[in-house]
Every structure is written in C-alpha cells, then in structure tokens.
Amino acid sequence: MFAVGLTGGIGSGKSTIADLFATHGVAVVDTDAIAHRITAPGGAAMGAIEQAFGPQFVAPDGSLDRARMRALVFSDDTAKARLEAITHPLIRSETEREREAAIGPYVIVVVPLLVESGTWRSRVDRVLVVDCDVETQIERVMRRNAFSREQVLAIIARQATREARLAAADDVIVNDATPLDALAREVHVLHRHYLSLAGAAPA
Ligand code: ADP
C-alpha cells in the first residue's frame, strides 16, 4: 500500500494532522504508539530489556520504567544504542504488520524520528513534514506535557534541525498559529494528491 511518512519535531502537530487524515478514511500507523505498546506490561520488548538492563528498569506493573530509562539514555549513548537495538526491529516489524493489515486508499505512518533514524526514508513512498517554529514547539510542549522550557529545549536539541527535516520533505505543512480549519483544508488538498499518487480515484 502507498505509504506517506509523517514527521516533524516534538509538538509540531503530527498527531493533530494524522487525526485530520484519519477523518478522510486514511489508515494511520503511529510508531510512537507502537513503541509504547511494546514497552507496556507484557510488551514484546520487555523480556529483552530486563535482560539487557536489569530488573530495576522494569516498573512493578511489568512496563518499562520510562523515567529511569529516559535518564539513562539521555546521558549514555551506548545505552541508547542498546535500547534501540532491542526496540527498533520490533517497532519496524509491528509497523509492517499494521501496514499490511491497513484498510484504506493509502497509509500515513507517523515517524517522529524519520529523518534521524536512517532507514525510514526508503521505507515510505513520500515524506510529509510538519514544520513550525521552535518557540511554538516550546509553548505547546510546555503546556501539553507540563515540561519546563529547559526540558523541551533539551529534547529539541537531540532532534533533527528544521532545515534537515525540510531537506528530506516531499511535502510540507506549516503549523505555527494555523487555525484548525485552515489545517483541515491543507490536509484535504494533500489527501487528494496522495489519492492520485496511490492510484485511487480522488474522493
Ligand atoms: P506532535 O504529535 O507533533 O508532538 P501534537 O499534534 O500533539 O504534536 O500537537 C502538540 C500540541 O499542540 C497538542 O496539544 C495540540 O493540540 C496542539 N496543537 C497542534 N497544532 C495546533 C494548532 N494549529 N492550533 C492550536 N493547537 C495546536
């Protein structure tokens, strides 16, 4: 099935835009949701994580102790690579499974780190980047996650730059102070374009 990779920095509006595509009957596969599921209680990654990092990284309910793991990988690139060696193949195979099961004219695959983590670019037919300025990202994520400005800045510093993301884009949606109805219109225009690229008749 024709696949569009949807990416953008934290708080840029990926989920908001994916939801708008879903209103047109487009299937959405969210790699963040998959990452969360494989590290939930009994999740497919939990056995290997416990073996590699120790039981102290498993919360009492059997899920990943996210705060502890976040603190570790933030300051330790080797640990980050070890964690990703466990999670990335599982995320990839689960994404493939969901893509194959998807029903609809094409599929939107939400990949926050599409530009950062190499192989994704070649595994989608088209890249849609949600772009917004850094101040907007900071405000949104501080509000949504109750993070401090410093926390948001630290996350942004570890993500690709706007320029790197835009360089990888086939299509761009600018989502700064964009009203939701304007965003919905932009999504509709892109949706028609993707329908024709996917070989489906425009709605
Ligand atoms: P991402 O998935 O890229 O992290 P979200 O779609 O969750 O971003 O958006 C981050 C926050 O900003 C959410 O609370 C969302 O409701 C809000 N938001 C996103 N786009 C807009 C917009 N155009 N106008 C107002 N609020 C927005």
Image: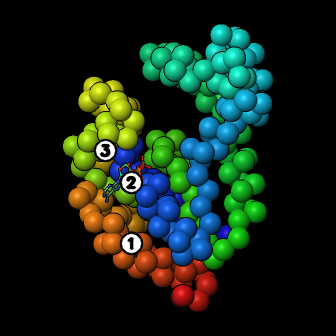
- Whole-number angstrom distance, CA of label 3 to CA of label 1: 19 Å
Mark 3–mark 1 contact, CB under 8 Å? Answer: no
Q: Earlier in the sequence, mark 1 or mark 2?
A: 2
Q: Quadrant of the C terminus?
A: bottom right
Amino acid type, callout 1: Ala
- Whole-number angstrom distance, CA of label 1 to CA of label 2: 12 Å
Q: Quadrant of the N terminus?
A: bottom right
**Residue 166 falls in which quadrant of the image?**
bottom left
Amino acid type, callout 3: Arg
Classify 10 Å Cα crowding around label 1: few (below 14), some (14-19), many (20 and above). Answer: some
Is the CB of the residue bearing disc 3 within 8 angstroms of ligand 1?
yes
Residue at numbered disc 3:
140
Is residue 190 or residue 141 the one in the foreground?
Answer: 141
**Residue 188 falls in which quadrant of the image?**
bottom left
Mark number displayed over residue 2: none
- Whole-number angstrom distance, CA of label 3 to CA of label 2: 9 Å
Q: Earlier in the sequence, mark 3 or mark 1?
A: 3
Mark number displayed over residue 184: 1
Is any atom of residue 136 visible in this view?
Answer: yes
SS for callout 3: helix
Residue 10 at x, y = what percent?
39, 43
Residue 141 at x, y = what percent?
34, 40
SS for callout 2: loop
Amino acid type, callout 2: Gly
Which residue is located at x 62 percent, y 39 percent? 35
Residue 5 sits above or below residue 12 on the image: below
Residue 63 at x, y = what percent?
68, 26
- Of badges 3 and 2, nearer the viewer stands 3
Q: Earlier in the sequence, mark 3 or mark 2?
A: 2
Residue at numbered disc 2:
13
